[in-house]
Image: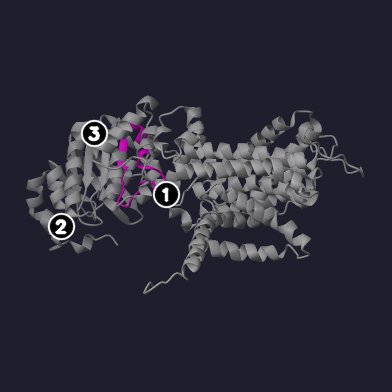
Amino acid sequence: MIEVSNLTVRFGGVTPLDGITLTFAEGTCGLIGPNGAGKSTFFNVLSGFIKPATGRVTAFGEDLLSMAHFKRARWGVRRTFQTEQAIEQLSVFDNVAMIHEHSGLARASRRADTLAAISFVGLEITPDRKVGTLGAAERRLVEVARAVVGAPRLVLLDEPAAGLPDKETVHMGEVIRRIPEQTGAQVILVDHDMSLVSACCGVTSVLDFGRLIASGPTAQVLREENVIRAYLGTDTPYETVPV
Amino acid sequence: MTAGQLPTDEAPADPPAREQIPAAGFFSGAVAALSPRRLDRRGQAHAIVTVALLAFCLVALPSILSTYYVDAMTQVVVYTIVALGLGLLVGRVGLVSLGQAAVLALGAWVATRLLFATSLPYPIVLLLAGLITMVLGTMVGLPALRMRGLYLALITLMLAGAITVVLATTNFPNGGSGFLGYNSNVVHTPAIRRPAIASSDAAFLRYSIVVAILMFLLVVWHLRSRPGRAWAAIRQSEASALAAGISTTRYKLWAFALASFLTGVAGGLLAGADRFLYSIDFQPQDSITLLAVVLMGGIYNVWGAVVAGLFMQFLPPLLTSWNVSPYWLTILFGVGALQVLTTAPAGIVDQLPKDLARLGRFIFRQFRRPVPSGGAP
């Protein structure tokens, strides 16, 4: 359960997040919106890279924003980035194990947990392979394995399937759907692929120009008029476009 | 340093069973890094060649060489250790330091002072010189960590200049008293002492090689364990390293500390190698030359440091013995660094074997050509 209240981020004259109040219930929640809606900014606030001007984020009853950014990983915040972040010179095993290594978990369980995470995402390769030798889809799965190894509490997935072919996207969707039941973590999925969001998320929230414009059951939200308008760009209030 | 993205991190004797190391204990990890049992055939060949080369350098080389080249090789060993530290900073963490020669001077100063003031065994002096230099180098690194790239390089260059200026006023200890240990009134200053087991030049070269091997093991052990993985994450992307729970500040400082420790130990060896040290021996531009040769040698492979050491300290005496001015090397290093950065970012240590293999194939084909070759292309 993640509770966000009145979250505002300002960069000079731009307000990428404007008074967001939002609750992410258990399971996998979707967060969608057109480019520049503030989705990545929201993730950056949760990761600690951006300090919000106002607002609170309470995660499982704890004040997330008061934690130093690298300590959030120890607490259980995991994330994938839009750009590939798996470390090329390290093996798949080391890539996943190093997250475990820095999350304050017992060393004894590291090997088993790491291998479990690798098999959870369905990577059918030897864990000794260097990530630099893997294909795009496999690298994405390594990143998801990094996000779920050990004891994650909040998993932020930033376009995990962007650019993947349909078959791999379907597999990615299945993996994402299983994360909450497998790990008990809260998952927030940002993606532009509505079929993936529909397949994974029971509840979806929509951002547009830094404001929350809709929130509710995914199928219902995707039919809402202002959501369609935000995506298709008709009748957009251009005077509010931040420059 | 856009070269950072290359997946050419071929540390020597890379065991295929790397995945067992994180689960293994502290020392078994280090042992596994060197244990031949876990190597595939190529790795075994690699390890055998390495051990044979080391044995040759350790046993035969000091006896074969003339005193002139024994001295030169000792300098090579010293600068190999310095290059190892700088290569670690640049290649593994992406921190460009232009002050390593000044840090070396610092280490040499501390070691000289300790060697004159105390009768501590030489290895202890080396260790202390390393540790004290580590503390000083880390203090220098602390403010510098807020900077990156060019700005960090500039700050380290300024600090190198500052250290050089300070050393020019304090001079190197020469057996005098007081904190600085410098006596300006003597004509015949005593030589800096050497370890009893390595009082001759050849023995001191052997001694230095052993110390260098220990330093290499220290670095390889770091690279194969927690800090090595954290550095790799930081080099790939600082944001993702933070998101992975890595305290980037701590691990950058750790890299600074390790590089300073290595350089301090190298300074301790330099004191015993030169036996008389003067401030003028350390010039700020040496740091720049050092960066150039480290880049040429290769920053993603610890063996690049050996190439760097040879470039820095073997080529000048070689040219001098041929009556060629070693100042020409500055031009060569400049062109070489440019060439490496544009065409072979992983350095000579990565490129040369590839080129040799290509040459080998080319020669092989030349000899096979005479066999009737119908319509072969």
Disc 1: which residue: B236
Residue at the spot 36% in from the left edge and 55% down from the top edge:
A12
Which chain does tag 3 point to?
Answer: A
Q: Are labels 3 and 2 assigned to the same chain?
A: yes
Given the image, on which type of amino acid does mark 1 rest? Answer: Gln
Q: Give, as a single range, the part of the protein colored magenta.
A: A73-93
Of label 3 and label 2, which has the lower sequence position? 3
Considering every residue shown, the one lying at the far bottom of the view is B375
Q: Are labels 1 and 2 assigned to the same chain?
A: no
Disc 2: which residue: A230
Q: CA distance from mark 3 to mark 2?
A: 30 Å
Given the image, on which type of amino acid does mark 2 rest? Answer: Ala
Query: Is residue A213 among what the camera can see?
Result: no
Residues marked 3 and 1 touching at CB (< 8 Å)? no
Which chain does tag 1 point to?
Answer: B
Asked where in the image residue B187 lies, by quadrant, the reply is top right
Residue at the spot 70% in from the left edge and 40% down from the top edge:
B59
Given the image, on which type of amino acid does mark 3 rest? Answer: Ala
Residue A89, magenta (yes or no): yes
